[in-house]
Image (cartoon, rainbow, N blue to C red):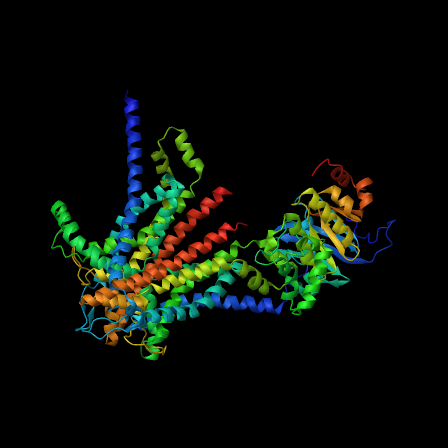
């Protein structure tokens, strides 16, 4: 019943994109509770895929299974395959998977004992990059990409937690970008932020998709409609519908999707 | 509902550093386990001479004659138990009083310093209690407490005899001061964990504040009991302070004024003097008995405190 | 009328019992004040520069100091830390990061058991483990005894403090492709370092005040000794030996030793207090 065969939805303003991440029949469990049922989904290169659905529908679990963060929860388990550029991520070292697939969390979580600079460079220095000039360059580049450079360039040695919530979240984005991932997963990145910060993050996503493949989980349907190219609707651990964002929000194929996007439940 | 043929074991993190680190930390954790077992094993092996000669009767014999190589642990077991229970008898009501004071009565500006003082009491080294007890408390007990007790309650065998100062009573009092902080702080914590609704329900029914407090105490009683037993465990093994005030004489006497001896004290006093293998093995056997008693007592106390805190956290969620 | 009288009685009882509670708190403070007062007044009268820089004088001669005992205590506590720090920190990390299993629960329980073992018993074990094979008393034996005593405190505080570190920080680090072990070491442990240091200082303070486990391990020594395989002096054993001696000069020095010991421990626990306060003061 899941439309996972649909790989490249035709899109007017985008030429056909290559598939970057392919999920095949993913089932995820916490102990004996099953959180995902046979989810198959293809995320395209340099596009934004939004995952929407009511809370508890498994959208975060799905996102966390893409970079093998699901498995760090004790008692968790998953079956099925997730391919990154055709390669099974479970055949790779988890550390390498996470270097290639970065993640931004719902609540900004900078390392409290580190300065802004060290927060951004953490992934590099712990990964063994020692050259200071290289690190400094990447820190600047990442902060620029995260649209934070102008605000913090004179206070790089201040603590990361001294920033405002919106700045902290952009710091976390910069931190994720610094290890030069190919894919960026965002788990409700703006839900803890004020409207102005939210707008900044959304602008940023629009910029970033030129270089990165982005998957974003959001409970905010306007946000999904604004930033994404494709949208997947999850309900009760199943993928109900996956299509171009425009189509999902204007002419969904499934009744459940329609009820959700028109605000009749969830 | 799902196709089981699709399920296959998932390869977990293969990072070598992670596996190495996990096993390294596990090794050190296992070291603690090994250490506890090793402690019991070492003492059992080193005391086998005693075990072979006296067997279990060692625990009920009351002779202590190193010259004739004739030994029994009863006076020490008796002294340990009596001094510790005496300490508990004094410390428990006081501790509950302090706990009620801290959790229900005292305003924050008073609660914090008193809590701090009680914690300081726990931080004073045993040896300092020892010399203070020996030079300050014992003379006071000899000149004031014991004469007063014997004139008031001298008909009881407990308070008969000459006021030496050093003896079971002094040991009990110094121990009670030492275990008070443990019992008081645990009781305070469990009293604070009592759900407000319990007290408010009582107050709403027209109870006085004290009656509501009594309900809180009875609600928290197994936690307080756990704290008391932890305090008892500490008292059983306390060495220096007791050694300096108990008189160190291996006799069993009904009077609290008489000197006594505890398992810990006999170890402190006679271990370096134990010249024969037999003497040494007897002392190590006493250490083993003390080890077993404290483990049993502490395990029981942990279990009690654990049940109560678990119940209260369940109550909150 | 009757209910009123009954109610008054209950009211009176309430006030009376609360007064008794306040009295217990007062009673608990009395010995503390007395101990401080006596240690301070008796200790101060015997303390002078010689106490800190001179060796003990032979029996019969007055004067001298306990310099070797002060240094000895520091050496013994240092040895104890060498034994206990690796075990305590690593085991604490295991319990917090990987210890949610029956093995972890067993180790946790045994750590609590070890915490309740009387220090004199630990001394006996150190004697059988170190003194008997070496055939003589030594600083090593004392260090092992103190180390065993310090392990439970360090292990459990390390575990508790690492558990307080929010899971989100671990996830942030793991999601950057930082391996789990580096995450634990460089992110989790650094974030919790204030609390972990508090635990270590508590263990050090407790070890510095221990006498019983040293009586027949490190024994005592009236001379300078830097050879760790030889008996080593300590402040606490000196306080005991001098305290029960018949010489008033030695007894006075015992009080001075008690004062120095108390000051050391008080300074440590104050440092702990300030450290924890500023840690909690910083919030989130």
Name the spot of residue B135 as percent of width and height, x first: 20, 59
Please name whichever residue, B28 or B142, is drawn nearer the observer in this view of the structure: B142
Of residue A168 and residue B251, the one placed in the foreground of this image is: A168
Quadrant location of the C terminus of chain A? top right
Give residue A110's position: percent from left, percent from top: 62, 55
Q: Is residue B69 above or below residue C243?
A: below
Q: Position of residue C161 (x, y in %)?
A: 49, 56
Question: Residue at image x 30%, y 63%?
Answer: B289
Q: Quadrant of residue B273?
A: bottom left
Above or below: residue A261 compared with residue B132: above
Is residue B149 visible from the viewing direction of this image? yes
Picture quadrant where residue B44 is located: bottom left
Q: Is residue C88 left or right of residue A76?
A: left
- Lateral position of residue B170 relative to residue C169, left or right: left
- The reply, left or right, for residue C257 in relation to residue C268 is left
The residue lying at 38 percent from left, 62 percent from top is C205
Q: Can residue B255 be seen at all in this image of the molecule?
A: no
Question: What count of labels does the image hold?
Answer: 0
Q: Quadrant of residue A178?
A: bottom right
In the rendered view, tell whether residue B103 sits above or below residue B23.
above
From the top left corner, tell me how far across and down residue B303 is, in percent. 40, 52
Closest to the observer: B102 or A121?
Answer: A121
């Amino acid at each position: 019943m899941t439309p996972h065969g649909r790989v490249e939805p035709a899109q007017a303003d985008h030429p056909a994109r290559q598939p970057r991440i392919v999920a095949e029949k993913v089932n995820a469990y916490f102990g004996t509770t099953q959180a995902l049922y046979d989810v198959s989904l293809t995320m395209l290169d340099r596009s934004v895929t939004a995952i929407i659905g009511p809370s508890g529908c498994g959208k975060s679990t799905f996102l966390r299974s893409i970079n093998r963060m699901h498995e760090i929860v004790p008692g968790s388990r998953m079956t099925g395959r997730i391919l990154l550029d055709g390669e099974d991520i479970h055949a790779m070292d988890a550390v390498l998977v996470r270097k290639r697939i970065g993640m931004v969390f719902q609540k900004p979580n900078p390392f409290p004992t580190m300065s802004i600079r060290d927060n951004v460079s953490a992934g590099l220095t712990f990964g063994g990059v020692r050259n200071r000039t290289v690190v400094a360059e990447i820190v600047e580049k990442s902060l620029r990409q995260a649209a934070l450079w102008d605000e913090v360039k004179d206070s790089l040695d201040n603590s990361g937690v001294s920033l405002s919530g919106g700045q902290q979240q952009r710091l976390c984005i910069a931190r994720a970008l610094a290890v030069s991932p190919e894919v960026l997963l965002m788990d409700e990145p703006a839900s803890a932020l004020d409207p102005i910060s939210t707008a900044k993050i959304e602008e940023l996503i629009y910029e970033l998709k030129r270089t990165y493949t982005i998957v974003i989980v959001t409970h905010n349907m306007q946000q999904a409609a604004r930033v994404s190219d494709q949208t997947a609707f999850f309900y009760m651990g199943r993928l109900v519908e996956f299509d171009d964002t425009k189509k999902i929000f204007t002419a969904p194929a499934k009744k459940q999707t329609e009820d959700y996007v028109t605000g009749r439940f969830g | 509902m799902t196709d089981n043929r699709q399920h296959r074991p998932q390869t977990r993190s293969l990072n070598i550093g992670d596996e190495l680190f996990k096993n390294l930390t596990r090794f050190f954790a296992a070291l603690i386990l090994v250490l506890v077992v090793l402690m019991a094993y070492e003492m059992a092996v080193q005391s086998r001479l005693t075990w072979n000669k006296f067997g279990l009767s060692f625990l009920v014999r009351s002779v202590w004659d190193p010259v004739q190589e004739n030994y029994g642990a009863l006076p020490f077991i008796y002294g340990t138990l009596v001094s510790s229970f005496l300490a508990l008898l004094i410390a428990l009501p006081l501790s509950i009083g302090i706990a009620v004071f801290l959790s229900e009565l005292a305003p924050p500006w008073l609660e914090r310093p008193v809590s701090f003082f009680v914690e300081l009491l726990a931080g004073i080294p045993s040896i300092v209690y020892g010399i203070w007890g020996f030079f300050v408390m014992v003379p006071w007990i000899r000149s004031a407490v014991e004469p007063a007790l014997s004139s008031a309650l001298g008909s009881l065998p407990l308070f008969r005899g000459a006021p030496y100062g050093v003896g079971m009573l002094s040991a009990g009092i110094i121990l009670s001061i030492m275990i008070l902080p443990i019992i008081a702080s645990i009781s305070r914590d469990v009293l604070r964990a009592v759900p407000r609704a319990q007290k408010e329900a009582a107050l709403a029914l027209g109870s006085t504040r004290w009656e509501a407090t009594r309900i809180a105490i009875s609600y928290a009683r197994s936690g307080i009991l756990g704290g008391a037993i932890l305090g008892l465990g500490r008292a059983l093994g306390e060495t220096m302070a007791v050694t300096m005030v108990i008189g160190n004489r291996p006799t069993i006497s009904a009077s609290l004024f008489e000197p006594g001896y505890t398992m810990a004290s006999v170890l402190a006093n006679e271990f370096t003097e134990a010249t024969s293998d037999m003497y040494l093995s007897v002392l190590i056997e006493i250490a083993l008995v003390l080890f077993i008693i404290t483990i049993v007592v502490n395990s029981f106390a942990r279990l009690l405190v654990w049940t109560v805190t678990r119940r209260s956290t369940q109550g909150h969620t | 009328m009757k209910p009123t009288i009954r109610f008054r009685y209950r009211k009176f009882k309430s006030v009376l019992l609360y007064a008794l509670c306040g009295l217990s708190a007062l009673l608990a403070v009395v010995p503390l004040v007395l101990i401080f007062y006596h240690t301070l007044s008796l200790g101060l009268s015997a303390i002078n520069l010689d106490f800190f820089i001179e060796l003990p004088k032979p029996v019969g001669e007055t004067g001298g100091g306990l310099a070797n005992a002060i240094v000895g205590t520091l050496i013994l506590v240092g040895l104890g830390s060498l034994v206990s720090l690796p075990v305590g920190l690593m085991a604490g990390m295991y319990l917090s990061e990987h210890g949610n299993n029956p093995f972890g629960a067993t180790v946790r329980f045994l750590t609590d058991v070890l915490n309740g073992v009387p220090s004199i018993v630990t001394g006996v074990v150190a004697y059988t483990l170190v003194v008997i094979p070496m055939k003589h008393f030594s600083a090593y034996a004392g260090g092992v005894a103190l180390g065993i005593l310090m392990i439970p405190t360090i292990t459990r505080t390390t575990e508790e403090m690492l558990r307080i570190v929010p899971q989100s920080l671990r996830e942030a680090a793991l999601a950057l492709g930082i391996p789990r072990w580096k995450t634990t070491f460089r992110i989790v442990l650094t974030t919790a370092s204030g609390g972990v240091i508090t635990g270590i200082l508590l263990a050090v303070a407790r070890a510095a005040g221990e006498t019983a486990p040293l009586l027949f391990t490190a024994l005592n020594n009236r001379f300078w000794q830097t050879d760790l395989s030889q008996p080593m002096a300590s402040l606490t054993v000196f306080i005991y030996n001098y305290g029960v001696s018949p010489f008033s000069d030695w007894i006075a020095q015992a009080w001075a030793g008690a004062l120095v010991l108390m000051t050391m421990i008080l300074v440590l626990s104050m440092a702990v207090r300030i450290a924890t306060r500023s840690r909690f003061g910083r919030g989130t």
